[in-house]
Image (tube, rainbow, N blue to C red):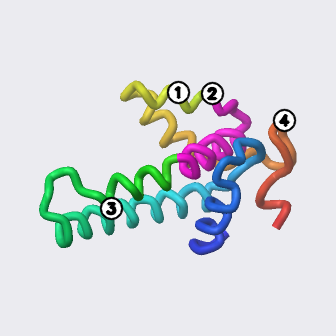
Amino acid sequence: MDFFSAIKSGFRHYVTFRGRASRSEFWYWTLFAVIMAIAGAIADNALIESETGLYAPLISLVLFLPGLAISIRRLHDIDRTGWWELICFTVIGIILLIVWACFKGTSGPNRFGPDPLAAG
């Protein structure tokens, strides 16, 4: 999956917590979210003269649900339940989620659906 396909897929399935997401889909979405956060911070600093900002919080709000959904689908790809996402509230948990996001997904179908790489 390429960069723009991942973004389209992220917004198309923005509240779909079922199914699986490939590594490329997850990491391209993460790259897009970071780029948008930086652009929002730059826009806030350049256009708005207050400390609270407008664009960065708005971008974070818009990207929160799609990011959560794609993170859960990524966990599904490595055959883990989406409830593991709650471990992000600990420092060790954040590290564990990043490591798991780097793992190759299970080959073939698993309990969460068909292999996203085999479908394409």
Q: Earlier in the sequence, mark 2 or mark 4?
A: 2
Q: Which mark is residue 83?
A: 2
Label 1: element kind: helix
Residue 64 placement (x, y as % from top left): 50, 48
Please give the residue where the numbered disc 4 appears in the rendered image. 111
Nearest to the eye among marks 1 and 3: give it: 3
| Disc 2 residue type (three-letter) | Trp
Q: Residue 55: give its label.
A: 3
Contact between marks 2 and 1 (CB within 8 A): the answer is yes
* Image: 40 above or below 63: below
In the rendered image, the quadrant that contains the C terminus is bottom right
Tag 1 and tag 3, C-beta contact below 8 Å = no
Residue at image mark 1: 86
Q: Indicate the quadrant where residue 106 lies.
A: top right
| Three-letter code, disc 4 | Arg
Is the Cβ of the residue at disc 2 closer than 8 Å to that at disc 4? Answer: no
Inter-mark Cα distance, 1 to 4: 20 Å
Task: Work out how far the residue at label 2 is from the one at label 1, CA to CA, in angstroms.
Answer: 6 Å
Residue visible at 44% across and 50% down? 61
Q: Amino acid at mark 3?
A: Tyr
Residue type indicated by callout 1: Leu
Is residue 68 inside the magenta stretch?
yes
Q: Residues within 10 Å of mark 3 (few under 14, many from 20)?
A: many
Q: Nearer the observer, disc 3 or disc 2? A: 3
**Residue depicted at x 24% and y 56%:** 53
Tell me the magenta residue range: 65-82
Up-down relation of residue 56 to residue 20 (above or below): below
Residue 65: give its label: none
Q: Nearer the viewer, residue 65 or 18?
A: 65
88 magenta-colored = no
Q: Residues within 10 Å of mark 2 (few under 14, many from 20)?
A: few
| Badge 1 or badge 3: first in the primary sequence | 3
